[in-house]
Image: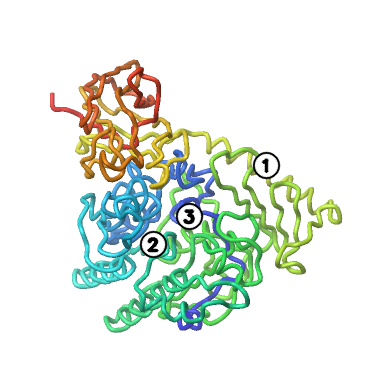
Amino acid sequence: MDKLYRESVHFTDFHVAPMCSPSRGQLMTGVDALRNGCTAVCQGRSMVREDIPMLSNYFEKAGYSTGIFGKWHMGDSYPYRPQDRGFQEVLSFRAWGLPSLASNWKNSTLNQNGTGDEYTDPVLAHNGTDIAYQGYSGDIFFTEAMKYMTKCQENKKPFFVYLPDNLAHAPYRVPSKYSEPYEKIGVWNGVKVPAEYYGMIANIDENLGRLDAFLSKHGMNENTILLFLSDNGTGSAEAAEIYNGGMRGMKADLWDGGHRVPFFFRWPGAEIQHSRDVTELTEAQDIAPTLLELCGIKVDDTHPMDGVSLVPLLRGEPWSYGDRTLPIQYQISGARWVAAAVPFKKWRLLEGDHLYNVAKDPHQDSNVADQFPDILKTMSAYYESWHQVAHAEFEKIRYIHLGHPGIPQVILYASDWQGDYCDNPTRLEAGSARGAWDVEVESNGVYRVELSRWPFEAGKSLREGVKGLSDQRGARPIASATLNIADVSKTSKTLAGQTLAIFEVSLKSGKTRLETIFGDDKCDPLCGAFYVRVTQLPE
């Protein structure tokens, strides 16, 4: 990282969202999270609207080979998967991480019983098929990305590679050779050193070095644009206490520690002034228009971007956006000032009434809203105007599609439903959450709808617990299942040992909502089906 820093243009006031999915949506579209619809990590808010093109769409259309190797977290059902959004080669996993609710059961913390290493020998989704891989996940993603780039070079194809490593993200698991140097430190200024977390960063650093050496060895370095950035502030409270760049806060916070991150840009073969700081206020939305301009690809005028090109800054030329205001808003609500921050020059306005001057107060300790009423008024007015427009787009419904030609089967995951928070093993084990999915039926027909309490590949019955009937953790007395979709409502009894509740329904094309309910022997609701498989049957 230090080497890359020395060779790069470094943006020192660069911002993302305080949480991963919104940052990724902004990065890939150039559009504010509130406008593109991807404002949170679950509860139906991790999907970018399907009508907004992504960088992968632009580069695929321009003739590039496109590949993702790592974390996606912007939807796991058609048409929101990476292979539906312009990526020709996909090696990823579902939802937020390898042990997430939507991930393959082998990767689950529950399946590992809390003793396994979810990041070693994982099951990954390769072009839509779950495949077991050998090794540590961080190493796998870099290795496979480099294999892909080699193949592109052999085929004389330009490439767009998105390599969003799954590190450093909880649960913190890393081979001991990376964590041991930090374990030996023990305590630093009264804080226990998070050895596994820092070990993950050491693994990222090592793989970044492998990538850099690979590009040089294969003669790709000069004409490959390399970007390095993070999707939010640190996820470790201990790490934030030990060193946090002088900032307050961490992941999910509205202070700068939640959303101001490193951003390095390197392109050795271009006329770019490297090895220097750029101090202007910039954001993740700027990356898309910047890359497209540098590669001569025209932006779709029907979907204007909120980001602006950084090319003049890269070249050391005058830039006309020095006075810009960058509203940041994430989370489920979308309501005025909820989880919202507004950077403007060196000012930060948080949730409408907390104003900070980070030039004088980088740790954001002093609220100076009363001392600068004119600044407060100007920034508030900008946000209000922005929110009125952005929120109208936030309310546009994003539908999961059923019955699309060539895609007869779709799996729905509780991490993408609208309803109770439910995207991790703890919530899966609790077995009490409920929700529903907005769906669009593309074609008339008969559909088989399979409801499951556990991942389909687990082969577990509806009533059993995490480790079977003998282990009551997660066991639920499921005795009935209900499916509500369009004008269809069906309920059936379920028996001990039954793994799925299966319905067949005739559906007409159109937009509707799919809801499931698992009930007890009196049909009183217990939870929703956390996994639903919908298959259009042949005529």
In which quadrant of the rendered view does residue 310 lie? bottom right
Is the residue 537 above or below the residue 191 in the image? Answer: above
Q: Position of residue 438 (x, y in %)?
A: 40, 30
First-in-chain label (1 vs 3) = 3
Q: Secondary structure at mark 2?
A: loop
Q: Position of residue 341 (x, y in %)?
A: 65, 52
Q: Residue furthest front?
A: 470
- Disc 3 to disc 2, C-alpha distance: 11 Å
At 26% from the left edge and 19% from the top edge, which residue is drawn? 492
Q: Which mark is residue 457?
A: none
Quadrant into which the C terminus falls: top left
At 28% from the left edge and 84% from the top edge, which residue is drawn? 217
Q: Secondary structure at mark 1?
A: helix
**Residue, disc 2:** 166
Disc 3 crowd rating (10 Å Cα; few below 14, some 14-19, many 20+) is many
Mark whose residue sits in front, 1 or 3: 3
- Disc 2 to disc 1, C-alpha distance: 36 Å
At 43% from the left edge and 41% from the top edge, which residue is drawn? 422
Residue type pointed to by label 1: Ser
First-in-chain label (3 vs 2) = 3
Residue type pointed to by label 2: Asn
Q: Which mark is residue 20?
A: 3
Viewed as shown, does residue 436 lie left or right of 131? right
**Residue, disc 1:** 385
Disc 1 crowd rating (10 Å Cα; few below 14, some 14-19, many 20+) is few
In which quadrant of the rendered view does residue 209 lie? bottom left
- Disc 1 to disc 3, C-alpha distance: 26 Å
Residue type pointed to by label 3: Cys
Q: Position of residue 326 (x, y in %)?
A: 63, 54
